[in-house]
Image (cartoon, coloured by chain):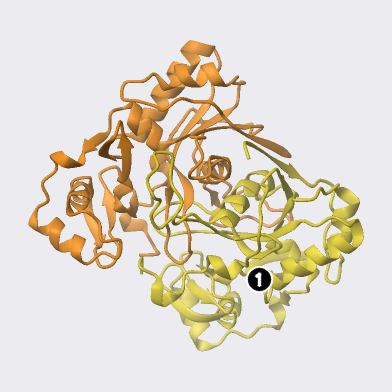
Chain colours: A orange, B yellow
Amino acid sequence: MKSLELIGVEGLPEVRSGDDLAQLLSAHAKFQPGDVLVMAQKVVSKAEGRLIDLAAVVAGEDAVRIAGGLIANPDPRMVQVVLDESVRVLRSERVLITETRQGYVSANAGVDHSNVGGHDKLTLLPVDPDASAKRLRVRLQELTGVEVGVIISDTFGRPWRLGIVNVALGVAGMPATVDLRGTLDDDGEPLRATVLAIADDIAAGAGLVMGKTNRTPAVIVRGLELRGSGSGRDLIRPQAEDLFR
Amino acid sequence: MKSLELIGVEGLPEVRSGDDLAQLLSAHAKFQPGDVLVMAQKVVSKAEGRLIDLAAVVAGEDAVRIAGGLIANPDPRMVQVVLDESVRVLRSERVLITETRQGYVSANAGVDHSNVGGHDKLTLLPVDPDASAKRLRVRLQELTGVEVGVIISDTFGRPWRLGIVNVALGVAGMPATVDLRGTLDDDGEPLRATVLAIADDIAAGAGLVMGKTNRTPAVIVRGLELRGSGSGRDLIRPQAEDLFR
């Protein structure tokens, strides 16, 4: 594979709860076998109704206390929602870093503000991004007859390096990692401990086309020639094996 | 920007110390104004002579002790070289994570095995990857008359997520980050704390074309339409501000 295309899907309408994303996508893009579709989490969450009305949330004591110590000075109700979406708080001074129910470590558990129809809503991560990716893949195949890989992506911060990058939360119909251990490098030396997080590399590349503000929540990556299958869970480092912690 | 091309530069010969990388590249690729060239660190290091003969290294006590506790069971002389390239050891049990002289936090300080002309050598990161990127950019402009952005990349592991991803070490002739704070998102809401690490996203995308074993150390990214300038240092989170630590 010596060349790749990253193609933004243009003209998608504002997505609402219950929308058939695959139908919207197939009306605005032509898929080819082997394409990988990278889909921004926020749109998937909206289609799946993973929205909470801020007005319906009551902040508990912990949420009020934590909110007071955060740089962003968030609404304590938003902090409450982040805590509800999390199984463990890693840090709650200045920034709120948690482990989500899905196993991701991120700021604010992926909870984001969104104005939907003039109301203050919060979008939550899909309950199971791998399942979301799989449903989208199956439905796209039903509608178009074409098999594609699907990645549900979101932008995450990371330790040691500044800025956010797009990463893969859910993966279907393609591998999430490529394990090169045992193969030889250019010099004929065995590669050590080399597992490529290709779904994250793909998500990051697609992030360049998505931007953050422009309305391009779907990107087609063409030319990858991937084989095999995997899931977003393959990219989560089990806590016990996390040698960086 | 709605579509991007990632083009691998094919046919580059084995690079040796003292080689003029820009000359090799311009003989194998046609550059266009606004292109970003992503160049694998190992090739830059070889051209710059950042190689150490393993036979010439003597491991000190610390290196021998640390080597004994690492999963990879490395040659203590390699550990010595990693320590020499580092200003701080973050972890030395099972894996060796350090902060390099350049400020990166990574496994083994980016030191890698390489067989050069039948001898066991270690490649070190460029002394100043931003300077390497700038030299390459200036020399490419001399030779081709075309101004391109340049990224020197390497594959790094990261906490919490499995697998390695390609990241930007050195950057020239383009911004490393895009600061969206103060702009509005799709819903008209102000974006909070949104600094995109675009040079890392670009490096990651290019990493898909580079692979790890195939001989494609140079990738041209076309269609980005970037403005401004920055450096690889923009992507390093200062220790005092690292809210994840």
Image point (61%, 67%), residue name: B232
Q: Secondary structure at mark 1?
A: loop
Foreground residue, B8 or B60? B8
Give the side of residue A64 with respect to residue B230, left or right.
left
The reply to whether residue B244 is visible in this rendering is yes
Depicted B109 relative to depicted A168: above or below: below
The amino acid at mark 1 is Leu
Image point (51%, 40%), residue name: A214
Residue that badge 1 annotates = B125
Depicted B16 relative to depicted A171: above or below: below
Residue B79 sits in quarter: bottom right
- Where residue B43 sits: x, y (%)? 75, 62
The reply to whether residue A125 is visible in this rendering is no
The N terminus of chain B - image quarter: top right
Q: Residues within 10 Å of mark 1 (few under 14, many from 20)?
A: many
Foreground residue, A12 or A187? A12
Q: Outermost residue, left direction?
A: A61
Foreground residue, B47 or A27? A27
- Where residue B229 sits: x, y (%)? 66, 63
The C terminus of chain B - image quarter: bottom left
Foreground residue, A52 or A106? A52
Depicted A128 relative to depicted B174: above or below: above
Count of numbered circles in the view: 1
- Where residue B71 sits: x, y (%)? 46, 65
- Where residue A226 sits: x, y (%)? 59, 32
